[in-house]
């Protein structure tokens, strides 16, 4: 395959962009029998994060000011996004020392981040009209602390406001990204017998199969089910370096959008003009969509 691409870079489906290279890598791994190589690690980290979910939710609930609470939730998403075994540096840290979610929240690089629209978003978040947002679609990233302690507390806050939340997860395993079946199981474990997430009605929480099998995503190739669910979205959140930064940072959507993630590759940091482990919070508001 490599020899073919050296002779003709477009020999395997087009120009070798980020999405194509990821797809070819996954294809080779699966052909060689490596279908879910981080399954054991994912299961262990999911169990740890589930045990911490209640405490993280309580910490967020204790913040009375709406603006401060949403900033804390955003910081939680970024801190959770550190659990990424697709980054060689972070995989090494994880293997050596493990990772503390609360410590990660405190140790994010100081603001302003390399792309930082958080203040603008906080202003919108606290406006009465924005509190009535109807539907949010969130493209999730990694297993463990990322989805359970980062994304789900944010989704829970949206649910508390009466928003329908669609969590879109990968169809097949890729690195340590959470899959649709895994996310269904996680949410089932977190709900109480009344279907609530720490006291918040979760009947408006939907989980969708994105149809994707890569750590990046081409939004023109999502599953028909997700396309249907997302047709009335008022907000789309793309999380993680692969989905939010490497492949969709400049994507223009028909509704408000958030691209959020941590910069975990030196090449991406250089491209953005930021630091390694810098943060991206890009908020785009669409008027009269």
Image: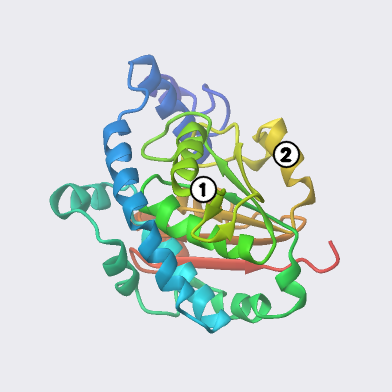
Looking at the rendered structure, which numbered label has been put on residue 179?
none
> Can residue 207 be seen in the rendering of this structure?
yes
Q: Is residue 13 above or below residue 119?
A: above
Q: Residue at x 49, y 32 (%)?
A: 181
Q: How is the image coloured?
A: rainbow
Residue 215 falls left or right of residue 159? left
Q: Is residue 282 above or below residue 168?
A: below
- In front: 29, or 78? 78
Q: Residue at x 45, y 80 (%)?
A: 112
> Can residue 114 be seen in the rendering of this structure?
no
If you read the primary sequence from the N terminus, does the residue marked by circle 2 or circle 1 appear first?
1
Image quadrant containing the N terminus: top left
Question: How many numbered circles does the render carry?
Answer: 2
Can you give x and y, in whole percent of width and height, for residue 107 in the image?
29, 72
Residue placed under numbered mark 1 in the picture: 140
Residue 284 falls left or right of residue 62? right
* Quadrant in the picture for residue 55: bottom left
Residue placed under numbered mark 2 in the picture: 227
* Quadrant in the picture for residue 77: bottom left
Can you give x and y, in whole percent of width and height, for residue 82 in the image?
34, 56
Which residue is most to the front?
Answer: 193
- In front: 23, or 101? 101
Which residue is most to the left?
Answer: 96
> How packed is label 2: few (under 14 Cα within 10 Å), some, or many (20 or more)?
some
Q: Secondary structure at mark 2?
A: helix
Which residue is most to the right?
Answer: 288
């Amino acid at each position: 395959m490599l020899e073919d691409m050296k002779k003709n870079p477009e020999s395997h489906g087009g120009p070798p962009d980020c999405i194509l290279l990821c797809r070819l890598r996954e294809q080779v791994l699966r052909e060689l029998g490596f279908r879910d190589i981080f399954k054991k690690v994912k299961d262990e980290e999911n169990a740890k994060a589930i045990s911490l979910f209640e405490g993280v939710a309580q910490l967020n609930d204790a913040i009375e000011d709406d603006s401060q609470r949403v900033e804390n939730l955003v910081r939680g998403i970024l801190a959770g996004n550190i659990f990424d075994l697709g980054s060689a540096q972070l995989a090494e840290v994880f293997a050596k020392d493990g990772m503390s979610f609360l410590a990660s929240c405190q140790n994010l690089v100081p603001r302003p981040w390399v792309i930082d629209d958080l203040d603008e978003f906080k202003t919108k978040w606290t406006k009465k009209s924005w509190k009535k947002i109807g539907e949010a679609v969130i493209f999730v990233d990694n297993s463990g602390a990322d989805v359970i302690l980062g994304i789900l507390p944010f989704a829970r806050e949206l649910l508390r406001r009466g928003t329908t939340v669609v969590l879109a997860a990968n169809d097949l395993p890729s690195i340590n990204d959470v899959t649709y079946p895994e996310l269904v199981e996680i949410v089932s474990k977190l709900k109480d017998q009344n279907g609530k997430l720490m006291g918040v009605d979760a009947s408006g929480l939907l989980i969708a199969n994105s149809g994707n099998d890569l750590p990046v995503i081409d939004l023109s190739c999502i599953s028909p089910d997700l396309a249907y669910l997302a047709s009335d979205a008022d907000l789309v959140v793309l999380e993680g370096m692969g989905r939010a930064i490497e492949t969709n940072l400049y994507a223009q959507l028909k509704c408000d959008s958030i691209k959020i993630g941590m910069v975990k590759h030196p090449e991406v940091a250089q491209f953005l003009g930021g630091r390694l482990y810098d943060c991206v919070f890009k908020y785009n508001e669409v008027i009269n969509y």
